[in-house]
Amino acid sequence: MEIQTTPIAGLLILKPQVFCDQRGYFMETYNRKRYRAAGIDADFVQDNQSCSSYGVVRGLHFQRPPFTQAKLVSCLIGRVLDVAVDLRKGSPTYGQHFAVELTAENHLQFFIPHGFAHGFSVLSETATFAYKCDNFYHPEAEGGLMLSDEDLHIDWQVPADQRILSDKDQHHPLFRDLQSPFQW
């Protein structure tokens, strides 16, 4: 497994080893021992999967303490732009984001630790997206940021008039109005 750091501390891109032959491919998508050796000491307790069509943008979501979630995400079918925004007050990258393209072909995984808002946009006709989470979902702890917030400067790579959003995701606060519950 290859591990790539990002300009934002804690965010990691992982490239599992893929074994290909005439039958297709095989890869280990998670191995606690290997991931802990890589610095990912999350105790994953819940797996989620979503299927979306082109233009769907999900996010930017987070869970407030004490129900924060670290995530290990990947795209199983199709192509997505995955984005994490640093919400850790006191972090040198507070308010900054990092984006990575995850595809069924590149097999990349993105690790997002506690203290980040997370979202993705679907760049292919459809996409199936997988999440491993280290805490259970608690609706009362849910938070979010307006994904079109100009202060965040996120290029979702989907024209604004083609974005498909849930009602909830159209009403999150702007970053400047967020009282972040996370500390560096």
Image (cartoon, rainbow, N blue to C red):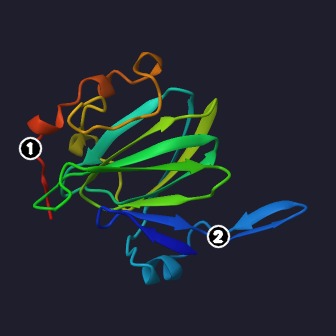
Residue bearing the label numbered 2 = 28
Say few, some or many: other residues with alpha carbon within 10 Å of mark 1 (under 14 / 14 to 19 / 20 or more).
few
Residue 27, numbered label: none
135 on left or right of 103: left
**Which type of secondary structure does the marked residue at label 1 adopt?**
loop
31 on left or right of 45: right
Q: Earlier in the sequence, mark 2 or mark 1?
A: 2
178 on left or right of 32: left
Tell me the residue at 23%/30% (across/down): 172
What is the quadrant of the N terminus in the image? bottom right
Residue type (three-letter) at the residue carrying disc 2: Glu
Disc 2 from disc 1: Cα separation: 39 Å
- Relative image position of residue 29 (x, y in whole percent): 60, 66
- Relative image position of residue 132 (x, y in whole percent): 47, 58
- Relative image position of residue 156 (x, y in whole percent): 42, 34
Residue bearing the label numbered 1 = 179
166 on left or right of 117: right
**Which type of secondary structure does the marked residue at label 2 adopt?**
loop
Quarter of the image for residue 92 reads bottom left
26 vs 91, nearest the viewer: 91
Residue type (three-letter) at the residue carrying disc 1: Gln
